[in-house]
Image (spheres, helix red, strand yellow):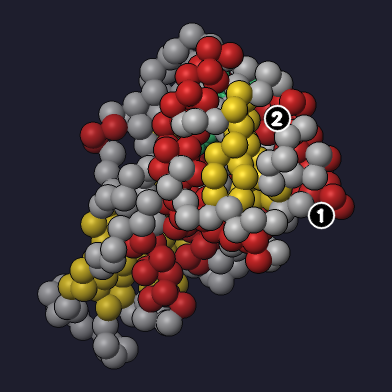
Amino acid sequence: MSTKIKWGVIGSGGIARRRTIPEGISKACNAELSVVFDINAQVNAEVAKDFDAKQAASIEALLDTDVDAVYVATPAHLHGDQVRASAKAGKHVLCEKPLGMTVAEVQEMIELCQQRGVKLGCAFMMRLVAQHAEALKLINEGKLGQPTYARVQLSCWYPPIEGAWRQDPAAGGGGSLIDMGGHCIDLLEMFFGKVARVSCFINNTVHDYKSEDSAIAMLFFENGALGTIDTFFCIPDNSSKNALELYGSKGSILAKGTIGQAPAGEMVAFLEQDSKDYDARQVRTEAQEMIIAPEPVNTYQAEIEEFSQAIIDDREPLIGGEMGLRSQKVLAACYESARTGKVVDVN
Ligand SMILES: NC(=O)c1ccc[n+]([C@@H]2O[C@H](COP(=O)([O-])OP(=O)(O)OC[C@H]3O[C@@H](n4cnc5c(N)ncnc54)[C@H](O)[C@@H]3O)[C@@H](O)[C@H]2O)c1
């Protein structure tokens, strides 16, 4: 195999065209774009022209080429069939989130990829944000002490749009919770480990489409820490600063705007050098602010390079199908909690 992985793209006209092809596949040092397919033939032709790729007339035709890997970037309800078809054709697959529509479907996708000897990746690129990697390092080094509480916020303004697949649970699996909350849950599991149980509310607060436009979930982690995620389709983009807050017995790591598609945002840590005695004055100015500002990383380039390298090195991808499965399990528990009004165990 050459040191450049040949990529095919299924669903070339959305995030693939906006970000993953121009910033990821085209820029990656170990990847090249070979062939694209989209159900919208005109859009597909434009993408093929813009990025100097071949156009396939069908998924079968794309899978019949010599591509090593396929990037699936279609609406959520199509992921299962397209990943299965790619695996059966012997292609490694990087699939957008959510991996599938149900936990059972994702389990089946993972098993099929294992049987066919192909790698399955889940495009949780927010794990690769430079500040998030630094925060994870601090946590792993014990600088935060015992993890106690985490909050992740990801919201946007998403008004009713005729035919929008995210606004119909039959196509998107749900609304703001599965679409943006999936990233939040995945990030929190990266920082604090597995979620054991959840309690969740969803609602249509502003928009009257079939998917929820509002969701909050409370998370109880296996390590005893607590967390919340809040994710809305009905808060203006500029009003939501996508907060990430991580607290522990020895400090906090606080960020705004690091969760998103472009390298951006600010992160600071307030870490105590020694364990503290109780101070009735509750002075809040002693800990030194530590600004966390590493060299920015383009997450689309990083995810394509990482997955391509996993193929070249024949190792598991850093963000594999199992992480997609974890997210799907926590999301399923959240939806069940919202439906029943009960606290739900994830496993
Ligand atoms: N990680 C990220 O930054 C990020 C951002 C946006 C979207 N996403 C994910 O990417 C996926 C796509 O979202 P989007 O925003 O690009 O949606 P989109 O609707 O903008 O684009 C989807 C594309 O898929 C095409 N398509 C639809 N049915 C198809 C079929 N049967 N075969 C081939 N192509 C088909 C559409 O024509 C369209 O071009 C979703 O899973 C979403 O969650 C990830």
Task: Determine whether the beta carbon of the residue marked 2 sits less than 8 angstroms from the nearest atom of ligand 1.
Answer: no
Q: Secondary structure at mark 2?
A: helix
Q: Nearer the viewer, residue 199 or 169?
A: 169
Classify residue 99 by image quadrant. Answer: top right
In front: 342, or 124? 124
The residue at the point 46 percent across, 31 percent down is 51
| Place of residue 141 in the rendered image (x, y in percent of width and height, measured from the top left) | 43, 82
Relative to 289, is 342 on the left or the right? right
Residue lying furthest top = 162
Residue 3 in sight in this render: yes
Q: Is residue 77 above or below residue 105?
A: above
The label number, if any, that marks residue 62 in the structure image: 2
Residue tagged 1: 117
Q: How many marks?
A: 2
Crowd rating for badge 2 (residues with CA inside 10 Å; few <14, some 14–19, many 20+): many
Q: Could you tell me which residue is drawn at 66 percent across and 45 percent down?
A: 69
Farthest residue in the right direction? 115
Give the foreground label among 2 and 1: 2
Amino acid at pointer 2: Leu
